[in-house]
Image (cartoon, helix red, strand yellow):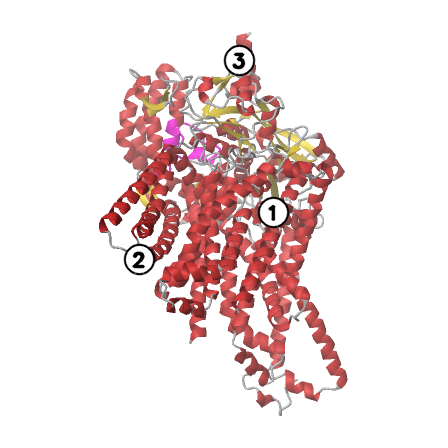
Amino acid sequence: MTTNPSIAPIGPGGAGRLAAPRSLLLSKRASRLRRVLALLGHGVLFLIASSSALAVIFIFFFIARDAIPFFRLEGFKEFFTGTAWYPTHEPPVFGALPIFVGSGLVTLGAILVAVPLGVPAAVCLSDVLPFSVRQYVKPVIEMLAAIPSVAFGFFALVIFTPLLQEHGGRVLAGVWWVVATPLVALLVFVLSDVVANWVVGEARHRAVRVLLAVLMAAAGAWLLFDVGGRFAALTISSGTNALNVSIILGLMALPTVVSVSEDALQAVGRELREGAYALGSTRAEVLVRVIIPAAGSGICAAVILGVMRAVGETMVVWMASGNAAQIPQPWYNLLAPVRTLTATIAGDMGEADQSAGSAHYHVLFAMALALLAISFVCNLISEQVIRRSALKNE
Amino acid sequence: MQRAVQGTRRLGGLSVILCLGCLVAAAQEDGAARKIVVDGSTTVGPIAKAFAGYYMAQNPDVNITVSESGSGNGAKSLINSTCDVADLSRFMKVKEFEAAVANGVCPVAHVVAMDGLAIVVNPRNPVQELSLAQVRDIYKGQIKNWSELGGPNVAIVKISRDTNSGTYETFESLVMDNEKIAPDTEYVGSNGAARQRVKSTPGAIGYVGLGFTKGVKRLLIDGVEATKENVASGRYPVARPLFMFTNGYPKLGTHLHAFVTLHLTSDGQEMIERKGYVPVTSYPAKARLVNDDES
Amino acid sequence: MRLGTRKVVDRSFTGLGIFSIALVSLALVILLTPIVVRGIGAVVFRATIEHDRVLMEHFERGNASTFAARNATAIAARAPVYEMLTAYEAQYGVDDFELEELREALQRLLGPAPDQSKPTLARDQFGATRWAQAQEAAHNVLYVQEWDYSDPTQFGVPVDVPRAKRFAGTPLESLFPYVSEHLDEMLQPHWTLYWGFLLDDSLDAHMFGGIWAEILGTLYLTIGAVLFAVPMGIISAIYLVEYAPDHWLIGVLRSCISTLAGVPSIVFGLFGLAFFINTAQVSKYFMAADSTGVSSKSILAGSLTLAILILPVIIRAAEEAIRAVPRTYKEAALSVGAGKWRTILTVMLPAALPGILTGIVISMGRAAGETAPIIFTAAVSVGRPLEVWQTLTQPTPALPWSVYNLCTEHTAADEIRHVQYGMVLTLVVLVLLLNTAAIILRARVSRRLAG
């Protein structure tokens, strides 16, 4: 094959000694054969490349195949609006609304933890910290993403749950103090300044300013103590509840939120930043008024991806959410045990009479289908949002 | 040179194929006789795990795997021929039998032990005794606070087993009279998890198999303590047999046969006893004595 | 706002970011500290003579002469205990509930009495193997825990009643002070490094022994998943970068890949159950035709399920890595007459290899840690470590599932907390090692690309 002495010396690296020159020497028929072969190869490649699409189609097909019999048996109405979940009772009742609410509640809680923590962290990573520090901070957040969910679940069940039960109120109060004190102090400072400017204008009335500051500080301290006291007085009868799961899920969704919003912030060009700085803004003003709005859609996508992460998580909610199929009273009561879609699937999948086509078996697939639909829609939205922001930034 | 490279490549390809062939051959040679797959109830699980450990120690070439995924799952696996032994903490349902027969599977029951459902609370809880009706009212959500039962002013945290478990079905039929359990009941996936939750939650109440009552307090039900003797004699109201199901009666002399009849040996009975269950074979005599004494 | 205020706001804004990063780090520390500290406790701990006995009898390991010496001392120290018991039985008979309780407590501490036949269950064959457990067991010998429910409107208070009181005036009265004084001699506590925790089989559902079956199972599942996913992933990536025409079908394909990445892991589990186990019965093809066995869940089915789960990760990483290869490489290769495939195989792929490897390593971490997909397809609670060829037909214990199983379902979950922590730590270390490798790889790549 490579014995032609005139060709051999061309490619000393040996990499491409074969293909191109040889085609010059080949007959028409051979070149047609090559073209057919190339086309075939292309086809095979496409087939392999579409294996993931095939997987998606298979997943949809197999889940839907077992989900549809449920809707045929029981209809849609009870599943989406019923509030009683007794899948093994005689006759069974399949009101999955509490389960949807449960999934929604823990997801909301997770987002309430992940976004206020994650977005400032992303801003800090992209615009504040110097490269030398960022180098060490990013792996920390990636570590959080890498820890297996069962380890989080283990922590939630074995360490966090007893802690909440034994010292529930005090733990919450402690968290409140740590988080709220700096925020309230900042708020007091800014507000007192703003109010003072509003009251006395630009004039230098030192006494008024100090008085206002003291008043505000007192109000802030009262707020801190009052809410802190309320938290401390809480007793948590059951540590496996929506709050426990929300905090853990929030931590799990956090890396997604941080990395996607950091990408979005980075994508906002230098020009905008430099323009804003040139107008004399401080860094905070640049970020709040210019950069974050410009990266808004990217941050939205980050939140959506975080939602996806929280909705789809199984082990943590199965182990630590309490799995009570109820709508909490009132609905935002995070201290109530709740049941989620994923945990219901994982826990109930053992239901008996699969071959006999029981509704309980199929209802779990209906839930899986709902989960699939949710993640599909979230995915589409986030893709759309990212694409639009990419267009805008160009 | 190129040819040599191609030659080695071809050789490489050949050897890969050969290796795969060997793998398949080895896997086939392995056959199935030396693999026993056990699936099912978490209540029977400890017995199955102990049996598996014991049997594997005696027969080093046998691999017995035990999953604890619930009675329903065990039955389903047997119906689909994805397990050899299905652990059930309830009897197989008619529908399951029908499905099994339709699949060409003929379930045969082996009663391995007796078990009682102990109603348990946290040991800190001063309540010692409840009637069956009170337990029912608690789970129906009509009694919400321990103070209504003469205990401390603490909300009752109800723990239940997952609805696919045989334990749940036993509880539903024997205690709840098929009434619905209140929606704020927390569900856990296994006896062990129920015990854990009750043990770590001061206001909790739960129900678990007799083998899972370490660290929690068994309540007297209608004045009867959940002991092995009371279970065996039938005085304790919430008791049931535990099953292992196989597809047909296993061929004599196989590992499978030895495994599902292990509970009849004295070692098997000792293991069952030590795990906190009631062996089927040794207790009736003793239990009858208890009843005779009373009558 | 005044300039000063603006400055302060600016500073505190910075502070806010750093504060949130600090909180995240704090959360990580709170999460990992107990896992690391108590996980190490599974390997490094104060062992008793019973631990050595387990190793000697079941794993044939340990220094026989040291053990014999220690054992002799221990037996000598224990002898009086059993003498007292015999004396008591001679006087009061054996049929005594309190005596039974005491014997049970002693068995938990010291193992079966010399006159007792060997129990069947491994957990009854040995006493407390860890000094911390031994102290607890000793406490249970000395005291009976009762509850003070004098005020029924309050929670009870635990009261330790000395067991000695029950046996006052009998030969057993002096047993209790003896036990509390000679505990050290009876159990011979010593610090030990039990590396076998990682490499030993488990004994009696993890009461003793190690977690080798779980580790091996996790490795098989991970490697299997990578074996299936990597060729597919890389070829898909090559196609997407080099061959894909600008066609709406390709857009759909890309959407599918990102959808696949977003599918909840439990759905993969359901799919694996419905497809690989119930429909395709993948393990059936590897069983002898006349086999009476069942086509159960298996490592093969689990690996296939995990492979689909990590496929999008690998495709994305490989795509990015191939795209990042400078155009000049490709152009140079083509210009010296290399064909397209040859260019890809010998120039592009080697150049993109570190990036692809990073993706593979990260996806390995993902596959190793996932629980939900293997619940229905591969994981069992008890099983042997498998040979390679058995992976095609047999299920296995795996770290993530066993963590769940042991901390919730096990009958003695509290007594084997150290095993659970050890497992979690092993899993976390495994995954973090993989991720660290990925981070280092990536750093090298970026350095190489930069200079």
The correct choice, above or below, for B176 with respect to C448 in the image is: above
Indicate the amino acid at tag 3: Val
Please state the horizontal and vertical placement of residue C377, each as a whole percent of the image.
Answer: 60, 47
Q: Name the residue under label 2.
A: C2
Decide whether the magenta segment is chiefly helix, strand or loop.
loop
Write down the residue under mark 1. Answer: A371
Element carrying mark 2: loop
Q: Which chain carries label 3?
A: B
Q: Is residue C280 left or right of residue C104?
A: right
At label 2, counting other C-alpha atoms closer than 10 Å, the crowd grade (few under 14, some 14-19, many 20 or more) is few
**A264, above or below C427, in the image:** below
Residues behind callouts 3 and 2 on a single chain: no
The image position of residue A387, as x and y in percent, is 57, 63
Say which element carries label 1.
Answer: helix
The residue at the far left in this view is A207
Whether residue C427 is visible to the viewer of this picture, yes or no, is: no
Is residue C122 found inside the magenta-colored segment of the image? yes
Label drawn at residue B90: none
Q: Is mark 3 on a helix, strand or loop?
A: helix
Would you name the residue on which mark 3 appears? B290
Q: Which amino acid does label 2 sit on?
A: Arg
